[in-house]
Image (cartoon, helix red, strand yellow):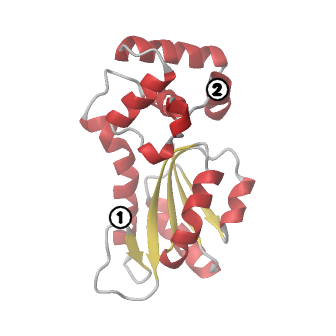
Amino acid sequence: MSKVIIICDSDIILKGLSVILSDCNADEVFLMHHKKELNDYPHLSGYILIILPLNIINDYEIQLKQILINAINIKYLHLIFEEKTSITSSDIYIGDNPASIVKKVNELLNSFWTKKVIEPINDLTKREIDVLLLVAKGLANKEIADKLSISIHTVISHRKNISEKTGIKSASGLTMYAVLKKLIDIDEISTSDLI
């Protein structure tokens, strides 16, 4: 599941973006005035796109990763309030027309899936990839079951299928597999889990 989280202290911007993004490909859109409000959503998991003002991204990025530990992947879209000559693909200007904002958001949301679509990964199902990514993040079977709202027996079954399809049985081996297949960035895992 993909989610969009908009963090901005302006009600007008939050409500405006909420209306504009009602047509985007996200499964859910969350509006927040401050990152602390994320603590009210401990269940947030999956693929998350965060939209927030550029001037606060550096202060928030590490803290957001710590709060959103259930996220499989997090991407950012910076909200720019002043017109600039160089707007990048990770920026949206507040004066952009709604269609271009939705297009940019959809492109980032779709990019969560392109790695999996372009190169089939030994016929792993989407749910097996979800389990693989959580294994790579160092979670135990019980923690994976809780995060994905499935039984521990289902997790064990998925892990067995993953091992059969990849030929890899250890958690550290599966972690390296996920990194090599570019399913997860190396900075998203604890290096102590690889030892």
Residue type at mark 1 is Lys
Q: Mark 1 points at which residue?
A: 104
Query: Residue 98 occupies which quadrant of the picture?
Result: bottom left
Q: Left of 18 or right of it: where is 187?
A: left
* Residue drawn at 38 percent across, 38 percent down: 183
Q: Nearer the viewer, residue 77 or 96?
A: 77
Element marked by disc 1? helix
Residue 129 placed where, x, y %? 44, 29
* Numbered marks: total: 2
Residue 12 placed where, x, y %? 60, 81
Query: Residue 16 occupies which quadrant of the picture?
Result: bottom right
Looking at the image, tell me whether mark 1 or mark 2 is earlier in sequence order: 1
Q: Residues within 10 Å of mark 2 (few under 14, many from 20)?
A: some
Q: Nearer the viewer, residue 178 or 98?
A: 178
Tell me the CA gap for discs 1 and 2: 33 Å
Residue type at mark 2 is Ala
Element marked by disc 2? helix
Q: Mark 2 points at which residue?
A: 145
Q: Left of 178 or right of it: where is 171?
A: right
Which numbered disc covers residue 11? none
